């Protein structure tokens, strides 16, 4: 599990898009699972799940459960696997009561839990999360985080998280990749960042302050 | 194909979530064609014929144009509104799924409410076929089938072109409607009634004339039209191949520049 972090316009989304096979890079190469996403798109994307926090992938006018069934056909998931995964996701994400309500009537928190379920219905090896907790209330945020952690531990799903929410990162992972202006600034443990930069100011500085400080320092270098 | 049918079913469910809107759209789209058609009939009754074309012949020409148009409206709506998918980022969702992009775009929308207009088109077609003065043979029936199919292919290709342009710009999409909706209205008459230069555009650039006018000349034996006039609807296949090429180029360009 890793988290990509950086200010607005740093290139987080573009990087994610390249890794999802949506965009071709202008230069360089990207190999995931031994495949080049943008060249072997169909073959590659069947093993990934993607959640774009600000875009829905559920059919808006019908209940999420209908979307799950259509996704089963899109991904050609065998029936028994599908039923098993579907039940597991419904239970763990606590969406049993809402999967039969039209998506447009769901709250953001409810919808996001269904979005995550939809992106995992084919049990991908890699899960891309682009700001999965944006705009969520505390309870939904915690459910989502807890579930992602469990998924990573139980099923060994690789999770690549892109976020502005430092608490997401703190709760989920220790590996942080910091980018800015299209360049890799840092790739390492979050605890190391914390040690290095909070000692310069005071010990109690919040994680947001630590990152902000580190970012200013990086720019100077 | 299984996925396509299931997606269409899903699209219909979504559409039927708004029942009143469904009914209104259905009635409105049927009425708009009906009024245009009534206008044509009234004019033809007054003058008996247009440039030597009888009511039956014009109905056949109209039927073929309207049928091809409405079929693509029903099944190709995803292409028609593709620019919205590009704008809203829904295209990204399509790209991260392991199915053909074209198939997914076609799956994304199906307009069941056009059923009224479709029935109308079929009635016009049947009226034209039943009353037109043609001695039917096996080859002539084949020509007729090619005319109807060619018309659908042509309108579909125009939608595909329209969708392709949204990879480069999402502005000015109304311009393309001139070709689809405008094309239907213009192609509802035999192109011989238009000015020469105009008729040429509709023969060599966008081959509307090839799906109804030229093959009909052959069917009716007008002006000693040779038998190969009956094969002109096949030109639409070339048009389709070109449109599909543009579509592919557009897609590649989207992937290298982003939104």
Image: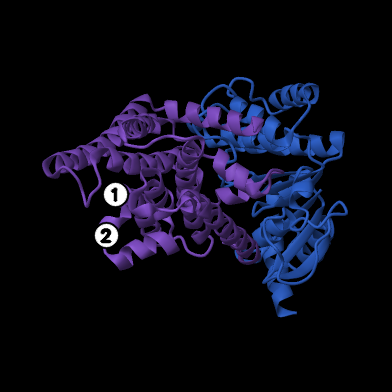
Q: Is residue A170 above or below residue A147?
A: below
Residue at 43% across, 59% down: B206
Residue B220, given in percent of the width and then of the height, sits at 36, 44
Residue furthest out toward the bottom: A221
Quarter of the image containing the N terminus of chain B?
A: top right
Q: Is residue B181 left or right of residue B235?
A: left
Residue at 28% across, 34% down: B28
Residue B83, given in percent of the width and then of the height, sits at 48, 53
**Residue B189: which disc?**
1
Colour chain B is painted in: purple
Residue B44, given in percent of the width and then of the height, sits at 17, 42
Q: Is residue A50 above or below residue B29?
A: below
Q: Which residue is mark 2?
A: B194
Query: Which of the two discs, 1 and 2, labels the residue nearer the N terminus?
Result: 1
**Residue A142: which disc?**
none
SS for callout 2: loop
Q: Chain of mark 1?
A: B
* Chain depicted in blue: A
Residue at 39% across, 29% down: B115
Q: Is residue B40 left or right of residue B132?
A: left
């Amino acid at each position: 599990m890793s988290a990509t972090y950086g200010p607005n316009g740093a290139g987080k989304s573009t990087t994610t898009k390249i890794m999802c096979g949506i965009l071709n890079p202008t230069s360089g190469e990207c190999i995931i699972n031994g495949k080049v996403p943008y060249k072997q798109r169909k073959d590659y994307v069947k093993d990934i799940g993607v959640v774009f926090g600000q875009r829905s992938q559920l059919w808006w006018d019908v209940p999420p459960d209908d979307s799950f069934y259509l996704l089963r056909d899109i991904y050609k998931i065998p029936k028994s696997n599908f039923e098993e995964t579907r039940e597991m996701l419904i239970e763990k994400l606590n969406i049993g009561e809402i999967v039969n309500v039209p998506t447009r009537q769901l709250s953001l928190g409810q919808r996001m839990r269904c979005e995550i379920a939809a992106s995992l219905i084919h049990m991908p090896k890699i899960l891309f999360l682009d700001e999965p907790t944006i705009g969520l209330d505390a309870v939904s945020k915690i459910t989502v985080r807890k579930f992602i952690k469990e998924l990573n531990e139980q099923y060994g799903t690789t999770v690549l998280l892109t976020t502005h929410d430092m608490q997401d990162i703190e709760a989920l992972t220790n590996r942080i990749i910091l980018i800015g202006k299209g360049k890799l600034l840092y790739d390492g443990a979050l605890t190391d960042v914390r040690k290095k930069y909070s000692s310069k100011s005071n010990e109690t500085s919040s994680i947001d302050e630590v990152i902000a400080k580190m970012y200013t320092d990086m720019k100077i270098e | 194909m299984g996925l396509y049918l299931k997606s269409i079913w899903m699209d219909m469910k979504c559409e039927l979530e708004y029942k009143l809107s469904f009914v209104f759209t259905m009635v409105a789209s049927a009425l708009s064609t009906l009024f245009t058609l009534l206008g044509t009939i009234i004019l033809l009754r007054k003058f008996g014929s247009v440039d030597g074309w009888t009511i039956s012949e014009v109905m056949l020409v109209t039927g073929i144009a309207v049928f091809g148009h409405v079929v693509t409206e029903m099944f190709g709506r995803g292409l028609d509104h593709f620019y919205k998918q590009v704008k809203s980022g829904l295209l990204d969702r399509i790209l991260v799924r392991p199915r053909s992009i074209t198939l997914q775009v076609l799956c994304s929308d199906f307009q069941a409410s056009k059923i009224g207009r479709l029935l109308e088109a079929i009635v016009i077609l049947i009226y034209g076929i039943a009353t037109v003065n043609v001695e039917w043979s096996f080859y002539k029936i084949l020509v007729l089938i090619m005319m109807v199919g060619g018309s659908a292919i042509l309108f579909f290709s125009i939608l595909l072109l329209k969708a392709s342009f949204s990879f480069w710009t999402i502005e000015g999409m109304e311009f393309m409607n001139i070709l689809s909706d405008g094309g239907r209205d213009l192609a509802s008459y035999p192109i011989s009634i238009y000015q020469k230069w105009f008729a040429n555009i509709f023969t060599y650039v966008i081959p509307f004339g090839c799906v109804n006018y030229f093959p009909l000349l052959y069917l009716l034996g007008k002006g000693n039209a040779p038998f190969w006039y009956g094969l002109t609807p096949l030109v639409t296949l070339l048009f389709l191949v070109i449109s599909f090429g543009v579509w592919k180029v557009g897609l590649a360009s989207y992937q290298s520049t982003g939104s």
